[in-house]
Image (cartoon, rainbow, N blue to C red):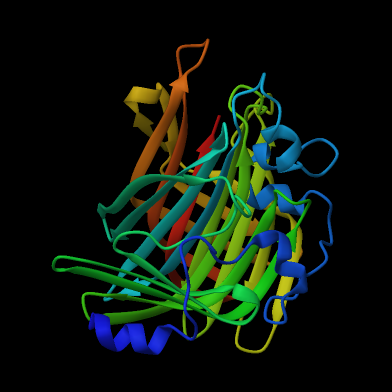
Amino acid sequence: MDGQRNAAKLEPRAVSEQAGLGDPSRAGRSRKWPVRALRHAWAAAAFLHLAACAPDGGVDPSATATDSAAVPPRHTRELIFAGQRGAEPLVSVLAFSTTDDAGNRSREVRGWLGHGAQWDTFLNEQWTTGAHGSPWAVVPHGPLRIAAGDAAEVEALWFRRGGKSLALQLGPNLGQWSRGPASHVQLARGTLRVGGETSAGAVLELVYLRRPGADPPGVSEQLLLVGGDSLVLLLGSAAPADRPGTEAPAFALLRTADSTREWSGVQLTHRGGRPVLEARREIPAGWDLMVPAAGIRGRIEAHEFTAETGQVERTGRRGVEAHYTVSGWVEIEGERVDVVGMARHVVR
């Protein structure tokens, strides 16, 4: 990537690290990102960790952050790109996290790049600032630069270090859902430029709050698939830990060149498993999907995954957060379309 050329193209305004960018709590006021009403109350939870929502439908970060008896909550914002390079899926994950404690804000940003069956960690930075402004705000640091547009929404991010470069540009909005100040999902078209080659795809933004020691156990998944000239399919499911089996109620959004459709009652079923030995758990090796109301079905196979594990639980197991590169097919009204993309599986 030509750093100077992209800097000139992607920086419509100056950005300071203190100011930060893109507070999701202000998204409803943004001209660019109109908030869509949920058709079903549980749909937001299907796209987020169960930890992101309290029983009353939202978590007030300021209320939990000021409780000195509790472990400080962790505010996390992920930007996930799914597209294709050559014949293989191309996935980029950027995860921004903050934790406030004693007037200080610990910040972390991590980045992973998946192509086919290969995953690489290209970014892992930690630093401390004062606890000023919104804990959700994204700030530039080190090799990561950020461009903002209207209402200080993130429009582009780019990374350059040594001979490695990556640029993520967000395009038109495809949908947005909010449920309280700590539950936010956004879907947009976008492009990812890696090593001088640009790939088109979709970008999923997830905003959620983790409360160590207080979050209920459960499983949540998101699949972001792209195919053909313009097809984007987003599926999400969430289930409590005491729900037996590998099938949970799911929600789906299908975007094509001429329409956007949404469904509940989607069936998302695990196919096989892969062990994560350090967590003493098995995670899915693939998925079967079905949308009975629309006659849509599909099969998705995992290429490879990168996983992080949590603290040891009383059972001796650990929670897992895994991101996959995936490919497969989706059949819509009798027409089969090859798809590639990303799957995210979280269990705690």
Tell me where residue 282 appears, x and y as whole percent: 43, 30
Which residue corresponds to the image point at 52% horizontal and 62% vertical from the top-left?
Answer: 224
Which residue corresponds to the image point at 64% horizontal and 72% vertical from the top-left?
Answer: 254
Query: Which one is in front, 107 or 277?
Result: 107
Tell me where residue 322 appears, x and y as whole percent: 43, 43
Q: Quadrant of residue 151?
A: bottom right
Tell me where residue 209 appears, x and y as whole percent: 63, 42
Residue 106 appears left or right of 236:
left
Which residue corresponds to the image point at 62% horizontal and 82% vertical from the top-left?
Answer: 150
Residue 192 appears left or right of 269:
left
Residue 255 seen from this side = no
Q: Quadrant of the N terminus?
A: bottom left
Residue 103 seen from this side = yes
Q: Quadrant of the C terminus?
A: top right
The residue at the far left in this view is: 163
344 is higher (above) or lower (below) than 50: below
Tell me where residue 321 appears, x and y as whole percent: 46, 39
Query: Which one is in front, 134 or 162?
Result: 134
Q: How many marks?
A: 0
